[in-house]
Amino acid sequence: MIANATSPNHLQLTRDGQLRHFLTLDGLGRELLTDILDTADSFIEVGERRIKKVPLLRGRTVVNLFFESSTRTRSTFELAAKRLSADVLNLDINTSATSKGESLSDTLLNLEAMASDMFVVRHAQSGAPHFIAESVTPGVAIINAGDGRHAHPTQAMLDMLTIRQHKGTFEGLKVAIVGDVLHSRVARSQIRALNELGAEQIRVIAPGTLLPSDVESLGCTVEYDMARGMKDLDVVIMLRLQKERMEGALLPSEREFYRLYGLSQEKLALAHPECIVMHPGPINRGVEIESAVADGPQSVILNQVTNGIAIRMAVMSMAMGGQVAERQQKLTELTERGLA
Amino acid sequence: MSGFKQSSGASLKIIGGRLLDGHESETSNSALLVRNGRIAATGDEALKAEADQTLDADGCVITPGFVDLCCNLREPGNGQKGNIASETRAAARGGYTTVCASPETSPVNDSRAVTHLILDGAATSSPIRVLPVGAVTRGLEGEMLSDMAGLAAAGCVAVGNGSRGVRSARILRRCMAYAQTFGLTVMFRPENQSLAADGYAHDGLVTARLGLLGIPEVAETASVMEMLLLAEETGVRLHLSQLSCGRSVEMIADARRRGIAVTADVAMHQLVFTEDALAGFDSRFHLRPPLRSEADRKALLAGVREGVIDAIVSQHLPHDSAAKQAPLPATEPGLSSVESVLSLGLLLVKRGELKLTELVRGLTSGPASVIGRTATISHDEIADLCVFDPEACWTPDCQSLISAGLHAPILDQALTGTVRLTLVDGQEAWASS
């Protein structure tokens, strides 16, 4: 077959299989994912020090390119970059250049002229970081901080870190993802990561209007009835429900959604007694989740936020390492050919 | 071979090669004599005849010139994406001698004036025949009927909706009833717009994984069913264009059995690629209708083989590079395909998915009959011919493509099948150097 689509892995991995961009979890093997988790573990300790800095990205410039607004993700990326000793520039593009009609390609050209080493990209369109990685000059690492409905790989990895901290392993785990899977980049990345890391069962629990066609092809089973879906669960991940879903005739009302798919103490009691409750935030209390559950003993929602910094430090340092190694390799090859 | 543009009295003799005219199985060619724009002699008579020039077509296939029912020349109005001169020259290189120009220009071809503009442009700058398709509604807005009779009188071969839907079934019914009055063929791309909504990719495995907005299969099939029922009721000659779903083929076959006058086409890229082409967010494969599943591709191929689908079209839609340089959802749909259709078709032949005779039928006699024309190679016929070498290699790249659109389906990879000579009215429209 003359497939000429560039697979994401030609783009995000070096020839030696090291990260050079971090765009999606598609095609990343268990070893690499575990490597990210282990590296993040080692950075957790940094956050507990009095001086919370390591010099891994000293002298590097990281640009947070947020085409879609975000508080939590952007601030944890910023903290992660600063703890790695990088210089950080935050750009909220949705309020500047593109609203003046500048194309994404032109915006990028201007940013490249500032000689940055890494772009952390959030964009409302699926595939935007992929496009940017293809368009920028070699040597600039692209980290996906969430694109459209496609992927949010750092969020999924921080969730995996949280699960591993509480459960020790992924083998044998039964995990459910509840709510608006259709619009969720987080869910897509989580399903991918859980499958690769060896979770036993991944269930998605939602009404038919909030599930993509062929969702089972992602490696999960569909459950419409939450009570049945909660049975024996080790991990339940609640997704955020955007208010505008009611307008598109995807749901009748928040009330009905909460009654059927909201996580109450009653429903949580149907899961394994040590089931942990997760949510990528920001949470809608009384829509996806009851306050008593969100703040309860089984909730690990705040651990997720802390782990977010460590995961982002891990991914940023690994991608920069891959870029440097690649440059070194090219230089060596040129020297060998006597061209340097 | 270049320079066969002399006075109309000049003659050309093509010797050797295989003759294939889409009607019968292939025969070996001893000789063809082209004189005064027509095929003046064949066989031994041609072999013996004197000619000003001779082309040795050994190893080549000689067919009637290709006919494209769906081609966007972009003129008037979209000069940055292409023009009649660039796109018809690209088509001539692809082996085409006739292209139907989509009504989706700017302004839309919904009046005699625009039709004349296109025909005048073609007369001065096109090496091949350009047959405009008129807009079925004014401005293609799906609200008021266009002057269909006037468009036909000005030279439109059919009326159609381009790539835009007709939102209201009531208007669609009236379009058909009015077109039927004048014996016009309506060319519709079936798409239910409310079901397609904001989608831009096949609603299936790849959209599930990549989080793209899907266009469900039913956006096409519901529209095909509606159009078939309306065609049955109004009696119009309906041509369903640019199909993408296997189910559509079934419904058309069924309608034909019931005696409905319906023909159909499919774009070559739908026969070669599937939704997988989008797996790396490759914006070239942002197409409308979208590339669908492997099962759909197979069913469309079967439709071509069995003759349910009459024609293979290029659906050539050139763009400036900025239109494709953005994240996938923000790009414009369409491929610059007219130079690659033959090579992609030969790839299918090589894989055993299509016979060469079926390919040639889909590119020549099939589409010709949809617009009431013929495409045969016989004595005294007009000499619209294509001579191609099925084994010669070429590599489409940004330097070598003629079309203003550089987003060809295959780039920087070798393909086989090059056109050596395209003749229109016996005159050279393209000759490889």
Image: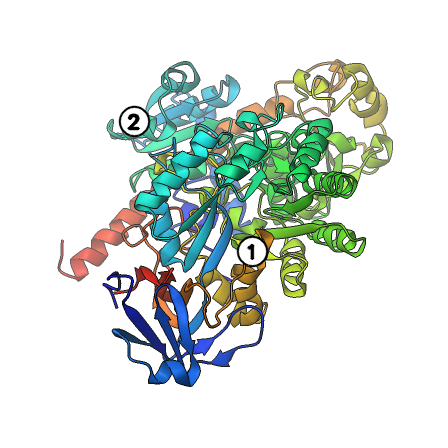
Q: Is residue B141 above or below residue B427?
A: above
Judge whether residue A68 can be spotted in this image: yes
Tell me the subunit letter for badge 1.
B
Image quadrant assignment for residue A272? top right
Q: Is residue B74 above or below residue A91?
A: below
Element marked by disc 1? helix
A66 vs A297, left or right, is left
A317 vs A30, left or right, is left
Residue A147 in the image: x percent, y percent? Answer: 51, 31
> Residue type at mark 2?
Leu
- Give the number of the disc on residue A111: 2
| Residue at position x 48%, y 27% in the image | A123
Measure the alpha-carbon separation of dots 1 and 2: 50 Å
Q: Which residue is mark 1?
A: B367
Q: Is residue A88 above or below residue A27?
A: above
Residue B358 in the image: x percent, y percent? Answer: 58, 67
Judge whether residue A43 can be spotted in this image: no
For the residues tagged 1 and 2, is the chain the same? no
Tell me the subunit letter for badge 2.
A
Image quadrant assignment for residue B386? bottom left
Image quadrant assignment for residue B11? bottom left
Q: Pointers 1 and 2 in contact (CB under 8 A)? A: no
> Residue type at mark 1?
Pro
Q: Of A172 and B193, which appears nearest the observer?
A: B193
Element marked by disc 2? helix
